[in-house]
Amino acid sequence: MADPITVRHRSLDEIMNGLDLVRSSPRGVGTLMLTVRRPDVGVREVLSVAELDPAVGLVGDNWNQRPSSRTADETPHPDMQLNVMNSRFVELIAGPDRDAWALAGDQLYLDLDLSFDAMPAGTRLAIGDRAVIEVTDQPHTGCAKFADRFGRDAHKLVWTDEAQQLRLRGLNARVIVGATIRTGDTVRHLPA
């Protein structure tokens, strides 16, 4: 899927009226609602089955080809292998069409509380039977593409203090244990 999908931009009032649903996301145990691979710039592939790998992140994704301004040599940042977003928030701003969710540019969409309180850096999550990812301290922020796709109100909102605390724009993670993951897999916090 390339970028031809357009999303009706929700007003700030519409988004704010739906935030209680996002705030009530489950803590501790949730669900993998969507996995999206980005094989090239502007291209999204919605996957029902995917492979996570500690060396490359989501297999077939172009993370390992993207330079990062956050590394001294501009190589891909190892703590930014995966972008993870709350599925309730993306549905609030993009609607129920999963192809529209993919426009956010994240790879994993979880029905799970991603807030700083629920998931500080170092939190490990098991996905399915074997895969394990770890939340990193690298911030995940909205960009101009996010504003173009979901509207200025959604973009402005993700920069507010509450939105930052809730991680409405999502979080960064890295793969600890690679394995196959599937839409519908249980996602659970692992003990520290």
Image (cartoon, grey):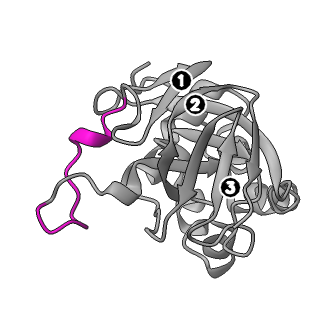
| Label located before the other in sequence (2 or 1) | 2
CA gap between label 3 and label 2 equals: 27 Å
Question: Closer to the observer: label 3 or label 2?
Answer: 2
Q: Which residue is mark 3?
A: 11
| Label located before the other in sequence (1 or 3) | 3
Q: Position of residue 89 (x, y in %)?
A: 71, 51
Q: Disc 2, disc 1: CB below 8 Å?
A: yes
Residue 14 vertical placement versus 3 (above, below): below
Q: Residues within 10 Å of mark 3 (few under 14, many from 20)?
A: some
* Residue projecting furthest to the left: 73
Residue 188 vertical placement versus 73 (above, below): above
Amino acid type shown at disc 2: Thr
Amino acid type shown at disc 1: Ala
The quarter of the picture where residue 42 lies is top left
Q: Which residues are magenta?
A: 61-73
Q: Is residue 12 magenta?
A: no
Apparent side of residue 4 relative to residue 15 in the rendered image (left or right): left
Q: Position of residue 138 (x, y in %)?
A: 43, 68
